């Protein structure tokens, strides 16, 4: 408000000292966000995430939003705008093999490059790493894990197993209480990611409202489509210097459809396991042939390597094989 406006409003005129102080305290300057983005190297991390993971468009967009928020927050601080450090604790929900651990690693790198954590590493744990088996055992176990994770990201997989209300002597609640304290008091040096199946995580949060209130970002990881799983297989094989021939790729597409119908399907994790078995079959095929082989033979998986999977057998035989493995 200038002097004329103050006078019209019946307010006393501001003194020269007051006006100067207000002008000095006001935020000033500009920040080149594009330059900040380049210098921090955030783009490299996001590009690597795109290369590593097939699909997952909503997840990648959310990671970009978080990166943008942190970049803008840093810019605000640079020009003196009042800002409160954003809450960064997260929940990752989805089925196994959908890239949750990989995304946690890339988020840790983004946080470190933008100055929100010191080290940018990820410590991945489960209930067994945090909860003890007798009185006085849980606190030191949990605190030791937290000590290792400080300056980075603590990734707790299947976090709902921390809470077992049906067992009165369970010590998981003690670990949760320690986590709550650290998530609140040391959030400037540690980001906690709780991961697991969506429905179980929701029940877990309902039972532990203190945890839910500290989670700022809930990210759901969808299952991969059949086509995306085929592309993932191709990327994995390329990393190992293998490839499908045309017939094998068609057979693998059929394999994915059949495998999805079976229990314990784990997306990219199941694809990796299947490829490992196909490589075993290829190796045995080449060994038993006993012929001289060239690079093409050593790197190519064929239709036979894929179709030897038990998932191509009749359902009755699959049931028999499952029963046999259970008995022995």
Image (cartoon, rainbow, N blue to C red):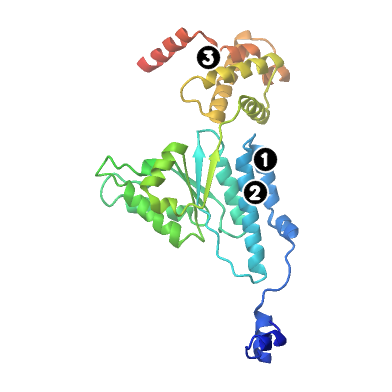
State the residue position of label 2: 64
Residue at the spot 65% in from the left edge and 66% down from the top edge: 76
| Residue 83 shows in this picture | yes
State the residue position of label 1: 50
Sooner in the amino-acid sequence: mark 1 or mark 3: 1
User: Pointer 1 and pointer 2: residues touching (CB < 8 Å)?
Assistant: no
Q: Alpha-carbon distance for marks 1 and 2?
A: 11 Å
Q: Secondary structure at mark 3?
A: helix
Instruction: Give percent across and percent down for residue 98.
Output: 55, 35
Label number found at residue 311: 3
**Observer-nearest residue: 204 or 37?**
204
Q: Alpha-carbon distance for marks 2 and 3?
A: 39 Å
Residue 15 lies in quadrant: bottom right
Q: In this rendering, which labeled residue sits more in front, label 2 or label 3?
A: 2
Q: Quadrant of the C terminus?
A: top left
Residue at the spot 36% in from the left edge and 46% down from the top edge: 207
Residue at the spot 55% in from the left edge and 11% down from the top edge: 312
Instruction: Give percent across and percent down for residue 265.
Output: 50, 25
**Observer-nearest residue: 198 or 316?**
198
Instruction: Give percent across and percent down for residue 113.
Output: 63, 56
Sooner in the amino-acid sequence: mark 1 or mark 2: 1
């Amino acid at each position: 408000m200038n002097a004329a406006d103050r006078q019209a409003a019946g307010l006393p005129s501001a003194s020269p000292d007051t006006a100067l102080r207000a002008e000095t305290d006001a935020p000033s300057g500009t920040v080149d966000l594009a330059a900040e983005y380049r210098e921090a190297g955030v783009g490299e991390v996001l590009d690597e995430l795109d290369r590593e993971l097939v699909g997952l468009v909503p997840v990648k967009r959310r990671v970009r939003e978080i990166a943008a928020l942190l970049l803008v927050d840093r810019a605000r601080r640079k020009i003196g705008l009042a800002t409160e450090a954003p809450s960064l604790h997260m929940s990752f929900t989805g089925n196994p093999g959908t890239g949750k651990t990989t995304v946690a690693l890339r988020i840790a790198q983004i946080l470190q490059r933008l100055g929100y954590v010191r080290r940018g590493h990820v410590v991945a744990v489960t209930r067994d790493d945090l909860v003890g088996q007798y009185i006085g055992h849980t606190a030191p176990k949990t605190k030791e894990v937290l000590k290792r994770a400080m300056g980075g990201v603590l990734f707790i997989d299947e976090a709902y197993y921390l809470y077992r209300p049906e067992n009165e002597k369970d010590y998981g609640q003690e670990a949760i209480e320690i986590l709550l304290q650290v998530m609140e008091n040391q959030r400037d040096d540690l980001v906690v990611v709780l991961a697991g199946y969506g429905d179980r995580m929701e029940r877990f949060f309902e039972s532990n409202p203190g945890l839910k209130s500290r989670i700022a970002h809930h990210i759901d990881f969808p299952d991969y489509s059949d086509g995306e799983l085929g592309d993932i297989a191709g990327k994995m094989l390329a990393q190992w210097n293998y490839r499908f021939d045309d017939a094998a790729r068609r057979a693998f597409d059929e394999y994915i459809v059949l495998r999805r119908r079976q229990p314990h399907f784990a997306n990219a994790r199941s694809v990796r396991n299947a490829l490992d078995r196909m490589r075993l079959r290829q190796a045995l095929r080449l060994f038993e042939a006993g012929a001289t082989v060239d690079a093409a033979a050593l790197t190519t998986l064929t239709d036979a390597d894929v179709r030897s999977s038990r998932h191509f057998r009749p359902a009755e035989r699959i049931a028999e094989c499952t029963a046999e493995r259970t008995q022995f």
